[in-house]
Amino acid sequence: MAKPFNHQQTAHCENGVVSGLLNHAGLTINEPLCFGLGSGLFYIYIPFLKINNGPAISYRSMPHSIFKDLKSLLNIKFIQKKFKNQQVAQQELDQLLAQGKIVGLQVGVYNLPYFPESYRFHFNGHNLIVYGTHNGKYLISDPVMEYTTELSPQELNTVRFAEGVFAPKGHLFYVDSIPQDIDYKIAIKKAIDKNCRRMLIRLPVIGVNGIRYVSKKILKWQNTLSVSKLNYYLAQMIRMQEEIGTGGGGFRFIYAAFLEQASEILSYPPLKEEATRMATIAEKWRHFAVEASRLIKNRNNPNASYQHLAILLSEIAEDEKHFFLNLKNIMKSCP
Amino acid sequence: MTHHTETKFENPKELVYVIDESAGKLKTELSAGWTPKAIALEFTLEVLANELEEIKQKCLLNKTSPIVYFMKLNRMDWQTLAAYMHKSVWLIKFHNVPFVFKKLSHTTIQKYARIFKIDVNALKCFNHNYHGKTI
């Protein structure tokens, strides 16, 4: 008899699926730990690329990089497969479920019937867990949903073979083996170090510099774009920041929770202070979203100024820079 | 564990991390939504709806083909549509030119119709009565 699966809701799909799969396999690991160990915190503005005719901004690393970083850091073996043929992909999934395994899938959001219409855009980096079948339907545990749901084979095939950027191509993954002893202390140190390096990288559009770049960009947009276009760009930024299960503010809060846990695991109190600082930065991100949404709401006001938004953003950039420099320093003296 | 058989949630509750003032720690909470986010989403949908209406008028004046209308209706961009068609972006844009569109083969139109989940006739005889549902 297979072990019953426990659905658990998380703020972000990738953390949720990875921690769900690992918890089921017997390794207790929660969302913040997944996110932190996967060095998930990031910021990137991709110039020249438009998503839904708006700027392409991401507040976390590439889809599936949390998963990749985590598994290589903790030396966990996952088996991953991609398919060309829908039938073969479905057969493989059926076989795995028949063996009592639970399987993580990468899917496209647009055709997921249980999502509200307003959230459904063509984004292919979503993840969910299939944990069984019932009356010819697949039992789905989508970590951003409060409840478990069901999908028919047809519906599941459609979302597994969504096309476009990051096309999932039926990508499935499941836990193969977990090492006996995991040294969280070393893993946490490595993960924090990696995250610091990523955020402080000396390139114009990535990490802390990326935030500063966008703050300057807002001022440029103010002069070059029409008000409606600029508002559309801002709306896109807020949506990227606070969309279901993702979000700049949201991710920063998760990272703060990770630092809290890290300080307990390493028994190193300075990290607890860093966690509080990160939470303050997260609050600032949320404040930025509030201000931006206010401008969108009062879009008919001719005297609207986008200057203070840019200032807010450059303040955040400065804060995050100091935060990560400080974090890097205190990790050096960590026992 | 609660299991819901109904397939649609109009307002799903999201899990968020918040600061627990009393304990000075972070905790998780279920949130029914947040105003700034709702404003941004509502505005985006409004822009998309306006854009769609403009394209519809263009289609009726034969300045563009219905392909772009249904593409926008399905919230796609050229890249996504091209990926679904397994064709290159410039070819899809070429198909969209009205006189090229009129000469497209039935099979190609069928392929478009299948991706847009509509009847072939909706593409072939596009008229102002068409009120498509987004999803």
Image (cartoon, helix red, strand yellow):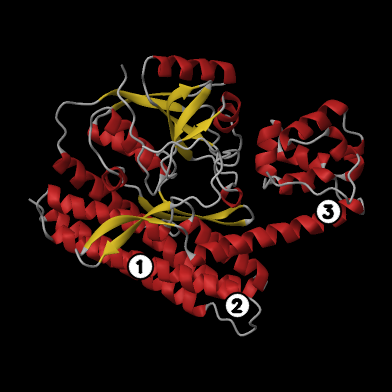
Residue drawn at (27%, 27%), measured in percent from left and top?
Answer: A25
- Cα distance, mark 3 to mark 1? 42 Å
The answer for which chain carries disc 2 is A
Q: Decide if residue A200 is in sight here.
A: no
Horizontal and vertical percent for residue A165?
57, 40
Answer few, some or many: residues within 10 Å of disc 3's Cα (few below 14, many 20 plus, some between 14 and 19).
many
Give the residue number, with chain letter if any, for mark 2: A298
Query: Same chain for marks 2 and 1?
Result: yes
| Residue at the extreme left | A335
Q: Is residue A15 above or below residue A129?
A: below
Give a yes or no on whether discs 3 and 2 share a subunit: no
Q: Is residue A190 left or right of residue B113?
A: left
Give the image location of residue A328, x and y in percent: 21, 57
3 and 1 marks on the same chain: no
Amino acid found under the numbered disc labelled 1: Glu
Frontmost residue, A172 versus B79: A172
Relative to the observer, which residue lies in front, A47 or A32? A32
* Residue type at the position of mark 2: Asn
Tag 3 secondary structure: helix
Give the number of the disc on residue B56.
3
Q: Earlier in the sequence, mark 2 or mark 1?
A: 1
Residue A192 seen by the camera: yes
Measured in 3D between alpha carbons, the distance from the residue under mark 3 to the one under mark 2, in whole angstroms, is 28 Å
Horizontal and vertical percent position of residue A99: 37, 14
Q: Nearer the viewer, residue A8 or B98?
A: A8
What residue is disc 1 on? Answer: A283
Specify the quadrant that holds the N terminus of chain A: top left
Looking at the rendered structure, the kind of residue marked 3 is: Lys
Q: Residues within 10 Å of mark 2 (few under 14, many from 20)?
A: few
Query: Quadrant of residue A24 in the image?
Result: top left
| Contact, mark 3 vs mark 2 (Cβ under 8 Å) | no
